[in-house]
Image (tube, coloured by chain):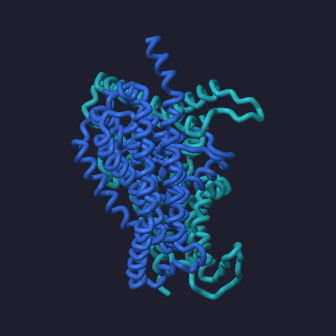
């Protein structure tokens, strides 16, 4: 139990415990969290009595789903965070509320993440993941139309990005609290580039299962997907198309990444500005020089990890499509014949 | 089940801490964690004062100081992130570590900052643990309502807590079923490729979602059948007694005093 939770902490590293964020950072991060959740309550329709048991059970579902895991390498295992999945299944606002409840219960009952840092944790893992998962996933799903590879690409990209955004926000908060940005950003983003792959694979498979078996439960999602198309085998032409598009995107992003590398710099600048603000109020919350570790400069490692991440994503998307063609289909066909 | 037993093992104690109103305990726990966050690095005396208050309360609660201290270690792996502080704060160099091409210089300020973060984190987790081990979740939720958390959020949280164990059991049945169907010979690789394993897990998650959704529909119908009108009721509403107010005020004042003294210099 102890070993397991320690491995989980090392792997996920996203439930920020109390003590790591300075008081101003932890307290101020409650403001956007509360605003987002208030908006979510309004948008879910004031939460009718009917919604309450649904949301509660869905929060318990995400909690339980996070306990499911699959072996990866050595003693490590992959598991779900669930923000993107919750948003795609239930809608962004309901997804945010459900995730907020999950994270709050984890902090209150299991000390998984701090109580003061709860505002930041809910924002990173609940609000941001749901917003990114839905905001990226739904337009992609609509753009690709009722096609099988559309779900695979859209679901995977949405889930992977949601994890990366959460990791980026966590790094930002830690950097604002005085940890060296030049180390925290590359380290967090690198680790989560891998964790995001597991998240993407699980999310895609879960979405495909729900859309094919109970499309009535997920109307907005099912409207942009055709359950029948999900059951059909993919033609060789589609496979080639997916491969080419994926390759093009990966190459494009790899070429753009030197440009994107100014991004972490921008974040560091924000961190420094904020740090100087904090220092003006109180010399003790002083933010540190970030480039003090030679050889671990932020931009370079970020570019490298970014490119590695992209290549892996591409390889895996390609791999899943191969797998789905090769393995899942005969089973599906047999099931249909029997039925 | 291990989850439930680890959670509720101590909440039925009869110590004064258990008996204290959940609102007072929640406020004091939050205030303690806030106070810890407000103590500047290197103020060992202030940290010791908070620790003394906390550990005295733990002893009064009779839940086992060693157990609380030990279980609070779970958050410490996160401290790996904070190790970077040792080498990045400007200050007097103490020693150097060479890792291949790069040499890291540890500074006194860095070491102090790192130690402070670790101690703060450890004490904060102990505070949260003490709250969780001495307070029933239903009381905690009621306290959250009293602290003006919106009613629907409290209702969702209480449903989530109520069905947490049901769905965790469901998830464990899924895991057991997978284990039964996935026998592995010793010394041989089993279970297909990584993507295949992830896809299997994804379908388990999807199955769990459908079961949870259908369960929530049955729950709602059952609640309607029992006369549910959308209002969750509680019998716990009562004003705080004078003693409880006193404890709250003394606790808050003590913590405020520690924070002020620590920041005064």
| Residue at (59, 28) in percent of width and height | B178
Chain A colour in the picture: blue
Q: Residue A264, position in %: x, y? A: 44, 69
Image spot of residue A196 (x, y percent): 49, 50
Q: Count the marks: how many?
A: 0
Q: Is residue B155 left or right of residue A321?
A: left
Q: Is residue A28 visible in the rendered structure shown here?
A: yes
In the rendered structure, the colour chosen for chain B is cyan
Depth check: A56 or A81 in front? A81
Q: Position of residue A209 (x, y in %)?
A: 43, 30
Residue appearing at x 63%, y 82% in the figure:
B107
Q: Residue at x 25, y 52 (%)?
A: A39
Quarter of the view holding residue A236: top left
Q: Say above or below: B257 vs B160.
A: below
Q: Relative to residue B13, is residue B251 drawn left or right?
A: left
Viewer-closest of A274 and A304: A304
Q: Quadrant of residue B49?
A: bottom right
B249 and A97: which is toward the camera: A97
Q: Could you tell me if residue B165 is visible in this image? A: no
Point out the residue furthest to the right here.
Answer: B187
x, y percentage for residue B102?
Answer: 66, 77
């Amino acid at each position: 139990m102890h070993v397991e939770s320690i491995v989980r902490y090392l792997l996920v590293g996203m439930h920020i415990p109390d003590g790591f964020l300075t008081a101003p950072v932890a307290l101020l991060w409650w403001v956007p969290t509360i605003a987002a959740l208030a908006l979510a309550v309004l948008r879910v329709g004031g939460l009718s009595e009917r919604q309450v048991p649904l949301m509660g059970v869905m929060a318990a579902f995400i909690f339980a789903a996070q306990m499911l895991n699959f072996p990866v390498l050595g003693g490590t295992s992959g598991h779900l965070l669930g923000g993107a999945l919750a948003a795609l299944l239930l809608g962004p606002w309901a997804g945010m509320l459900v995730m907020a409840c999950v994270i709050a219960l984890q902090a209150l009952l299991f000390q998984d993440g701090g109580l003061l840092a709860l505002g930041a944790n809910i924002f990173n893992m609940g609000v941001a993941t749901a917003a990114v998962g839905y905001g990226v996933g739904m337009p992609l799903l609509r753009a690709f139309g009722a096609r099988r590879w559309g779900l695979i690409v859209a679901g995977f990209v949405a889930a992977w990005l949601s994890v990366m955004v959460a990791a980026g926000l966590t790094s930002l908060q830690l950097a604002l609290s005085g940890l060296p940005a030049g180390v925290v950003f590359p380290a967090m983003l690198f680790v989560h580039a891998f964790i995001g792959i597991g998240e993407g694979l699980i999310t895609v498979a879960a979405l495909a299962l729900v859309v094919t078996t109970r499309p009535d439960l997920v109307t907005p999602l099912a409207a942009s997907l055709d359950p029948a198309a999900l059951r059909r085998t993919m033609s060789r032409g589609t496979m080639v198309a997916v491969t080419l598009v994926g390759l093009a995107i990966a190459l494009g992003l790899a070429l753009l990444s030197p440009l994107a590398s100014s991004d972490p710099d921008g974040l560091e600048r924000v961190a420094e500005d904020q740090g100087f603000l904090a220092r003006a109020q109180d010399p003790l919350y002083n933010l540190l020089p970030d480039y003090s570790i030679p050889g671990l400069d932020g931009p370079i490692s970020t570019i490298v990890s970014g490119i590695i991440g992209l290549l892996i994503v591409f390889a895996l998307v390609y791999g899943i499509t191969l797998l789905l063609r090769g393995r899942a289909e005969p089973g599906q066909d047999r099931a249909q014949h029997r039925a | 089940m291990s989850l439930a037993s680890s959670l509720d093992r101590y909440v039925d104690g009869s110590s004064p801490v258990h008996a204290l109103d959940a609102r007072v305990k929640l406020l004091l726990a939050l205030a303690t964690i806030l106070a810890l966050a407000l103590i500047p690095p290197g103020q060992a005396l202030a940290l010791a004062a908070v620790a003394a208050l906390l550990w005295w309360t733990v002893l009064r609660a009779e839940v086992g100081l060693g157990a609380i201290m030990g279980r609070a270690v779970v958050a410490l792996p996160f401290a790996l992130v904070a190790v970077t502080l040792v080498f990045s704060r400007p200050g007097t160099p103490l020693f150097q570590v060479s890792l291949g091409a790069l040499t890291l210089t540890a500074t006194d300020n860095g070491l102090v900052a790192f130690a402070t973060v670790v101690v703060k984190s450890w004490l904060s987790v102990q505070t949260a643990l003490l709250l969780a081990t001495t307070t029933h979740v239903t009381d905690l939720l009621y306290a959250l309502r009293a602290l003006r958390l919106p009613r629907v959020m409290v209702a969702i949280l209480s449903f989530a807590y109520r069905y947490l164990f049901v769905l965790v059991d469901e998830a464990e049945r899924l895991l057991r079923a997978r284990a039964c169907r996935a026998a592995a010979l010793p010394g041989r690789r089993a279970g297909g490729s990584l993507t295949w394993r992830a896809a299997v897990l994804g379908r388990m998650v999807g199955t769990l979602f459908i079961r949870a959704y259908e369960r929530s529909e049955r729950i709602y119908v059952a609640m309607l059948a029992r006369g549910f009108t959308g209002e969750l009721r509680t019998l716990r509403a009562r004003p705080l007694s004078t003693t409880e107010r006193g404890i709250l005020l003394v606790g808050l004042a003590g913590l405020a005093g520690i924070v002020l003294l620590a920041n005064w210099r």
